Amino acid sequence: MDAASKKLYSHKIKTAEQLSEAIGPRPRKQKVIMCHGTFDVVHPGHVRHLLYAKTKADILVASLTADEHIKKGNMRPYVPQDLRAINLAAMEMVDYVVIDNDPTPIRNLGTIKPDYFAKGYEYTAGQVHPKTQQEIDILENYGGEMIFTPGDIVYSSSALIELAPPSIAVEKLMTLMEAEKISFTDLRNTIHAMKGIKVHVVGDTIVDSYTYCSMIGGMTKTPTMSVRYEKKVDYVGGAGIVAKHLRAADADVTFSTVLGNDDYRKFVLEDLGNVGVHCLPIIDETRPTTNKNAIVASDYRLLKIDTLDNRSISDKIVEQLRQQITDVKTQAVTFCDFRHGIFNRGTIPQLAASIPRNAYRVADSQVASRWGNILEFQAFDLITPNEREARFALGDQDSVVRPLALELHKKSNCKTLILKCGERGIITYRRHEEDYRAFFVVDSFAERVVDAVGAGDALLAYATLAQVVSGSDVIAAILGNMAAGVECEHDGNWPVTPEHVLNKIDKLEAQVHYEGHVK
């Protein structure tokens, strides 16, 4: 549905106070009936419920639960509240729509005072639920009445979504952008303005190696595989690849890290130097440069050999890093924690305290095989954990994703949390002094997933730069998610360029225009 079409129906969407004024006080010449629900995916059961309710009164009010109070199922609601409201308003039988910002409709019932409140027939079975009894009490208090609609067709929105989620990523994006008054031009301008933004990356460097072999056979006396060596390829990973993503986005990047005095040190410095990353290496003679070597045969990883020393860095090195963080003139500082010595419970407060006052503070703690905890990075401007890292930090294996994200946002005391949810996209929670959309969901922009490795690094890089340039959590989340989508469409962790993201923006805008959305 395009913006012009939405305007045809938006006049139906009211606050409870506006609606109360529009329909007038009781007793009314025109009877009012109200239905309440989530209406996440409107199905035939919903339509029958609304049609029946309309036959009992002159004015039908559809009340829907706001996003923040929907906690049933992962990534729910699937359809954001603004879009759910338009969906209902577009129905001919619906006269008004109310987004209920409370967890139950009790307060709105008292404000609107409908003549009838309609519930589905399933609420007639068994003992009256305490919440239903509360609704009955408020209705009886002013003379209203509860009625139950018949229902021989019943569908579950949750079941339908799990069976085949509707493809509405573009509609959800446009609803978010329209609500925040963001255009595709704003996205492009943000990308262009990233050039030259000064970012200081601090973190653990990892050299990721792939030793390719071919199978020969197995030993006859022992269960030992025999392979023939073909080649070995090295890549800069860890915090180093984050620096490369930022540099690929045209940022002015300084990189502080700890390396061993070995050949991998030379490889890292040469590789980063070739792409224009300014390195401030601290050489620790007592440890090797971290290397993770995967033995690969016929596309199967047979074995992984790690050469590393995960001891905490010395007080001397902590002081050197603190001095670098203090001295480097930058607009953003990004801590990339892979738990290979630089970051731990003792060093994080010291290093965080050294960040320049006006710099944008970002933290990412990846715990694929280590015990990092994103909650140790307190009061940062942006953190970008994935679902597994969030569950680890909170010790929570049971909560669905959105309450999990909310709890992490509160306990980390961060301004913005972008929770990476893989193929389901991202959930962003933000803190602002004014009234605001507390959280929003952006679906994945990957057209087809070839290799998801590096998607989080690309998101971190572009979200950081977009936030520094625009000051908008929404633009940062959208562009970060677009960069992640681009990364997923290519093999390996390779740095995403502005051209790739601009191309993604062009494709989405073309799709929007083709489907009839307003430019």
Image (tube, rainbow, N blue to C red):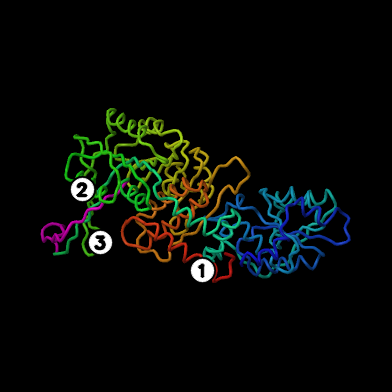
Quadrant location of the N terminus in the rendered image: bottom right
Q: Position of residue 226 (x, y in %)?
A: 14, 60
Pointer 1 or 3: first along the chain: 3
- Is most of the magenta stretch helix, strand or loop? strand
Amino acid at pointer 2: Phe
Question: CA–CA distance between discs 2 and 3?
Answer: 26 Å
Q: Locate residue 35 relative to residue 190 in the image: left or right.
A: right
Where is residue 373? Give x, y as percent: 40, 40
From this viewpoint, which residue is outermost toward the bottom? 514
Q: Is residue 342 above or below residue 211?
A: above
Which amino acid lies under the numbered mark 1 shown in the image of this protein?
Gln
Rendering quarter of residue 145 = bottom right
Reading the image, the residue beneath label 3 is 300
**In this figure, which residue is indicated by the disc labeled 1?**
511
Of tags 1 and 3, the one toward the viewer is 1
Q: Nearer the viewer, residue 222 or 362?
A: 362
Q: Quadrant of residue 223?
A: bottom left
Which residue corresponds to mark 2? 267
Q: Are marks 2 and 1 in contact (CB under 8 Å)?
A: no
- Left or right? Give the position of 87 relative to 263: right
As measured in the structure, the alpha-carbon distance from the residue carrying label 2 to the one carrying label 1 is 43 Å
Magenta segment includes 225: yes
**Nearer the N terminus, badge 2 or badge 1?**
2
Q: Residue at x 45, y 44 (%)?
A: 383
Contact (Cβ within 8 Å) of mark 1 with mark 3 = no
**Residue placed most toward the observer, 335 or 41:** 335
Q: From the viewer's perspective, is 316 left or right of 351? A: left
